[in-house]
Amino acid sequence: MKQSKSKAISILIPVLNEEAYLGKLLKHLNYNSTTKSVLEVICIDGGSTDKTTSIALEHGAAVVHSKKGRARQMNSGANYASGEILYFLHADTYPPKGFDKLILEAIEQGHESGCFRMQFDTKNPILRTFAWLSRINHTLCRGGDQSLFIKRGLFNKTKGFNEDYLIYEDTEFIRRLYQQTVFKILPEHVITSARKYREIGWIRVQFHFAMIHLKSYFGAGPDELFQYYSKHILNP
């Protein structure tokens, strides 16, 4: 028997052409959850043209269709979800063993939102150093690759993700959470893919992500951030 919805976790995964990663993640979630608290796994699809949605269904996940854009997709997933604890996860990020139990313990201790520390799936010393910084409880060290758990009440209170942001939506949202509650950094690690760094080059990607952080810190809006991302990372 599943736990009451007040202690139930809805896992929300925004996807777009993730056939290479999604099946592995869904198996990982099944093998590494240690309680009966995971009420549902929801893949919010932004218009995939590969086998993403069929893979999700084959592994027992629900599929919600949405307009493209992670902020829109995650908000759509939250509206669909039944659990009172929302856990947002990227398709190439793997939570630690017992992640559900660890989230529940944090919630029971009074934390309304938080994330795990992060490691990359690479031995690159520079990326390992940047991942090490994820243990620091400051907004400059936050990002969506660390995953995010949040109580539904706080999600609704903060009105969820800002859909004006086509990138940087996770960090923008988490900054608002820091203003509303004590954000919890769990000591265990998620493992996230360094695929973008391998595809484009870690120096280029890390430099331009740092510039995006700085631009946002000094007041750049969502359009300016997306234009910079498009020029230097999406279409370098």
Image (spheres, rainbow, N blue to C red):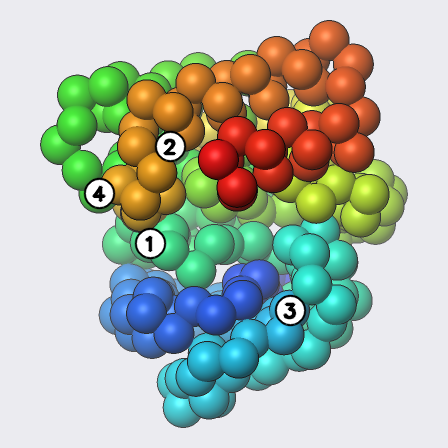
Given contact means CB atoms under 8 Å apart, are the residues at marks 2 and 1 in contact? no
For image coordinates 26% across by 41% down, the residue present is 198
Q: Which residue reaches farthest top?
A: 218
Secondary structure of residue under mark 2: strand
Q: Are marks 1 and 3 in contact (CB under 8 Å)?
A: no
Q: Which mark is residue 94?
A: 1
Distance from disc 2 to disc 3, alpha carbons, whole Å, reads 27 Å
Task: Indicate which disc, 4 or 1, sits on the residue closer to the N terminus.
Answer: 1
In this rendering, the answer to whether 88 lies above or below 192 is below
Q: Position of residue 187 (x, y in %)?
A: 34, 30
Residue designated by label 3: 46
The amino acid type found where label 1 is placed reads Tyr
Amino acid under label 3?
Answer: Gly
Q: Position of residue 16 (x, y in %)?
A: 54, 67
How far apart are the alpha carbons under marks 4 and 3? 26 Å
Identify the secondary structure beneath mark 3: loop
Element carrying mark 1: strand
Q: Amino acid at mark 2?
A: Arg
Disc 4 marks which amino acid? Asp
Q: Nearer the viewer, mark 1 or mark 3?
A: 3
Residue 145 occupies quadrant: top left
Q: Residues within 10 Å of mark 3 (few under 14, many from 20)?
A: some
The answer to whether the residues at label 4 and label 2 have Cβ atoms under 8 Å apart is no
- Provide the residue designation for mark 2: 117
Q: Which dot, 4 or 2, sits closer to the camera?
A: 4
Q: What is the count of numbered marks? A: 4
What numbered label is drawn on residue 121? 4
- Of residues 194 and 142, the one drawn nearer to the viewer in this rendering: 194
Mark 4 to mark 1 CA distance (whole Å) = 10 Å
Marks 4/3 in contact by CB < 8 Å: the verdict is no
Gap between marks 4 and 2, in whole Å? 13 Å
Q: CA distance from mark 1 to mark 3?
A: 21 Å
